[in-house]
Image (cartoon, helix red, strand yellow):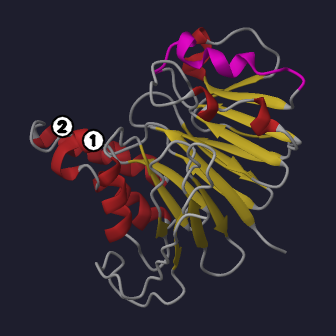
Amino acid sequence: MPKQALVTYFYQSAFTVSLKKTLMVFSYRQTGLSQLAEEQQLGEKDFQGFNNILVFVPNNSLTHHDHEVIYKWKSSFPITYILSQDAKKNAPEMPSIRYCKEGDSFSIAQANISVFGSTDAGVSFMVEAEDVCVFHAGDLNLWHWREENTLREIARAEESFYDKVAAIPKDRVDICFFPLDPNQGGFYDAGANHLIMALRPRVFFPMHFGTRQEIANEYARRSITRRTVVFALTQVRESALIDLTGNTPIVRSTAPSRQGRPGARRGSVDLSAYTQEDPFAQTDLPVSLEEGGEA
């Protein structure tokens, strides 16, 4: 039986994951985002056909006004909100909200949810639904600035991050979303590198790169491993169809449509021929990258 998921990028850490009957929404907001045109916003048209809609708010770094739109979606849709405990003060009183903290594990709407830690605000989420396991890191990252922090501060940051990652099950994650923040300077990718080596997710999507799309694209180009497809979605509403059926996942991306024209197929990645021993070997030869023109 095919095992597929459709991942759609909106901005920063906001993604949706669409399965057959389950839609997951992570870190979604609309305020203060001039790049998110009205026709690109997540709305009720996106909710049609799903039996369960899970909306995740991993931290309280955004205000109630930032997240206000998610609570205005029609109650007739089968929506459940899963919020970090620290986001409670900015959320309305609604029976469909479930608050959680690090270490919690529960089932909602035929999905198993495990809550892990963060090295900043809030929590990170692992969600298993329809035989697909998704991990969204929230603000979990190796947050330090090598050029500015002292060695002691860096050591504390590394210890905290390694401890948080060690609690997450290895070789279990199918789809992973993790920060790649260029504001950290020269070691902006250290957290992502460690997480890929430690957890070995099947497909890894960079997030939190702001307007620096080239950072995400370059990381995807040079960081493909034998076990993990690293794939960058950088345009609003750009989607990736992921086929997890075989031993190695296949990811195909389609750029969002513009002015009513169909989007261009951006390419695909298949790791089945990858044989390098070095998991971060920089080579394009074993990877199939197919370019396509506009339809």
Left/right placement of residue 90 relative to residue 198 reads right
Q: Which residue is nearer to you in this view: 252 or 117?
A: 252
Q: Which residue is nearer to you in this view: 267 or 58?
A: 267
Q: Which residue is mark 1?
A: 157
Q: Measured from the top left, where is residue 137 in percent x and y?
A: 50, 44
Q: Which mark is residue 209?
A: none
Q: Residue at x 28, y 55 (%)?
A: 190
Q: Measured from the top left, where is residue 140 in percent x and y?
A: 43, 41
Residue 16 vs 190, above or below: the answer is: above
Q: How many marks?
A: 2
Q: Amino acid at mark 2?
A: Glu
Is any atom of residue 227 visible in this view? Answer: yes
Q: Could you say whether the residue bearing mark 1 is in a helix, strand or loop?
A: helix
Is any atom of residue 173 visible in this view? Answer: no
Magenta-drawn segment: 61-76
Q: Measured from the top left, where is residue 213 in percent x and y?
A: 35, 49
Left/right placement of residue 22 relative to residue 100 reads right
**Do the residues bearing badges 1 and 2 touch, measured as CB atoms within 8 Å?**
yes
In reply to whether residue 68 is colored magenta, the answer given is yes
Q: Residue at x 64, y 65 (%)?
A: 242
Q: Which residue is mark 2?
A: 153
Residue 119 vs 76, above or below: the answer is: below
